[in-house]
Amino acid sequence: MRNIYKLISITILLMFVQSSCKEDKIVSTNSDELEGWELVFKDDFNGSGLPNSALWNTELSNRRNNTNGPDGWWLPETIYQNGEGELVVEVKQIENRNNDDDAYDYASGILQSKGKFEQTFGRFEIRAKLPQESGWWGAFWLFSNGIENVNNSGEDGTEIDIMEGFGWTDNMQHALHWDGYGTNHKFEEHKFEKPGIRDGFHTFALEWSETEYIFFVDGEETWRTSAGGVSKVPAWIVISGEISTESWAISNYWANQIDASKFPDYYLIDYVKVYNKID
């Protein structure tokens, strides 16, 4: 009998130790409360039609020009609130817009908070459903003007790609870019597989401090880095759909082949939240 009591005591002790040794994870909920953090920005896209212009800018531009094929545009009409609590980022085939020899072009959209909300450091979080078809990708990222500075450092501005996700694969990517986009361009990336990531909604987050970037998917840490020297300047939020017909983009390393017969396709966002760390 004493052996049975001893075995039970050991089992309880082991359960307690295992529980105590687990790392604390920040798991997203619909609540705005997050221990140790103060909410400073939120959009849950509960309206309909155009996004809230007090928070966001849209853009019309030839995002990904291709002299050897159809271009990939950003058009304001491809990004909108659907009246069901979601922001929709659409991709579709469109008529040729720039009078070159292409039979058609493609379009998706961008939403960015430049001049309306910019922040240095904090927690940046999105809950989203990724695209379902190949040929394009959805992204959630931060940007600042200093990215164009070339001085072998990202401290004065880094493009921070919190999430890039695809419709044809469970592979995902986090990335950092600094020193411009020319011959001096530098980057660090972390590509990984997340089974089931294309099913339903998932939460993607970045915790950005003075010393490092920490990336999360559904509350699980996926990458920790200080590559380039951590940026120390304000950045604005970007949500975008991306499509390009250039060879690098339509390879199985990236977005894979475009099949316009399966468009339109959608990248859906439930909310965006930004927090400040409470000292």
Image (cartoon, rainbow, N blue to C red):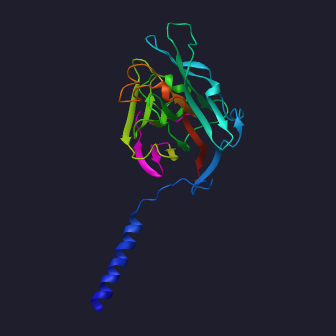
Say which of 95 and 40 sits in front. 95
In percent of the image, x 44 and y 33: which residue is there?
176
Report x, y in % for residue 250: 40, 24
Most foreground residue, 270 or 154: 270
Establish if 35 lies above or below 53.
below
Is residue 74 shown above or below 34? Answer: above
Asked whether residue 12 appears in the rendered view, the answer is yes
Relative to residue 42, is residue 21 depicted above or below? Answer: below
Q: Is residue 149 left or right of residue 270?
A: left
Magenta highlight on residue 73: no
Does 216 lie within the magenta span? Answer: yes
The residue at the point 45 percent across, 35 percent down is 167
Query: Looking at the image, which residue is at 44% across and 29% down?
Result: 177
Q: Quadrant of residue 186?
A: top left
What is the tally of numbered marks visible in this picture? 0
Please state the horizontal and vertical placement of residue 275, each as a whole percent of the image.
60, 47
Q: Residue furthest front?
A: 261
The residue closer to the viewer here, 250 or 227, is 250
Is 50 on the left or on the right of 197, as rendered?
right
Can residue 63 be seen in this snapshot? no
Residue 61 occupies which quadrant of the picture?
Answer: top right
In which quadrant of the rendered image does the N terminus lie? Answer: bottom left
How far across and down, in percent of the image, does residue 38 sit? 62, 51
Q: Give the residues drawn in magenta, as a range.
A: 210-233
> Residue 5 in the image: x percent, y percent?
33, 87
Q: Residue furthest bottom?
A: 1
